[in-house]
Image: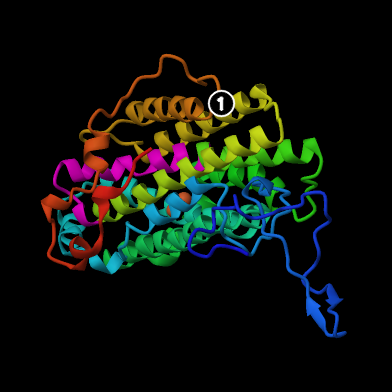
Amino acid sequence: MLNWDSPLDVGSVNINHNKPQTSVNEKTEDRAGHSAVNKLEPIRAMDKRVINGDADINQLLPLRYSWAWKYFLNANKNHWTPLDINMTQDIHDYHNKLTEAEKHMYQNVMAYLTTSDILAMRNIGLAVMEKMSAPELQIYQARQVYEEALHTWAYQHCIETLGLEQGEIYNRYRVVPAIYRKIEIANKRLNTILQADIDLRSQKGMHDFVLAYIFFAAVFEGSWFYNGFSPVFSLQRRGLMKGTAEQLQYIMRDEVMHCSFGIRTIKQIIVENKLVVDEDSVAEMWDEALQAETDYAEYLMSEPILGYTKEQHIEQFRYIANRRARQLKMSEPFPGAECALTWLDEQANVRKEKNFFETRVTEYQTGGGLLWE
Ligand SMILES: [Fe+2]
Ligand SMILES: [Fe+2]
């Protein structure tokens, strides 16, 4: 009998592992000739796998990946909506204080982020999540899908509030090569995951999947996205566009979790499948990402911006890339890269005590409990 008060306690359960598992529909007859559904053996945590597991996907407990459940609980501490943040000052700043170069930077940051976040939502929700075979992993990813949609709303809210030409901003990634290139690379790198017929029972299929997942978690979310907010944070440092920056602070907090969860999951897949990741392929991925980030930075900051340079943006990408590689227990792609934005961690952190605004957000979000790595 399963102990509902302590479902992880399987010590008293007599499990015969040699017996083949019965299906829900299998029936036996009792002495009176009445049919009855066979009692199913409890599932064992150790039978769960990230991919290709045999344990019942609809049964949450016993958890094997308790860390995944913690990510879900932690993600739910970051509750907010774009409407909770006061954008009034941003309207004034944008139309009266920003230079043309700063407007150019702001618009293209938004154009890049909004396209990327939809891509992220589709990738995690339509491709990655369905490959997982433990519900505790899927539950966090379901939350991630929602968060990506929320981020898309946040950008849209900023773009609309400032009165920008929405059709033009949303179409911009198609006509600006430096933005299009990043989306093009993402589509190419994620194509293997999105293919329904990927063979995850083969080592090659699994390796392709892991490479694509590394791109998604470490490069796309963990480096491009992570670095993508900094130009707006540099405006915030100067007291400009503080509403937008606050939206991005909440988004960045989610993204740090997405990246961290993805890397944790990748490492688990590697162990479970005894994979040897081809580090040359990963190095090539980082080089390609750096080239795209360089072109993007040169376009964003084609005119000088007070307190933020393209060199800083590029160096920060290299520095973050090294951090992601270390998290993956892989070689640093850019040895010697240094933190170019020493103010970033402080600037990006949501500080409750600052109480920027008197709205529901400060009342119900419990950001102090969130982890950054
Ligand atoms: Fe996002
Ligand atoms: Fe994300």
Please tell me whether residue 242 belongs to the stretch shown in magenta. Answer: yes
Residue range (magenta): 219-243
Total numbered circles: 1
Residue 61 at x, y percent in the picture: 56, 58
Residue 70 at x, y percent in the picture: 43, 50
Residues packed near mark 1 inside 10 Å, few (<14), some (14 to 19) or many (20 plus): some
Nearer the observer, 343 or 241: 343
Residue corresponding to mark 1: 287
Q: Quadrant of residue 129?
A: bottom right
**Magenta stretch: dominant SS?**
helix
Mark 1 residue type: Asp
Q: Secondary structure at mark 1?
A: helix
Q: Residue at x 13, y 56 (%)?
A: 356
Question: Is residue 124 rendered to the left or right of residue 280?
Answer: left
Q: Quadrant of residue 364?
A: bottom left
- Judge: label 1 CB < 8 Å from ligand 2: no
Question: Is residue 330 rendered to the left or right of residue 224?
Answer: right
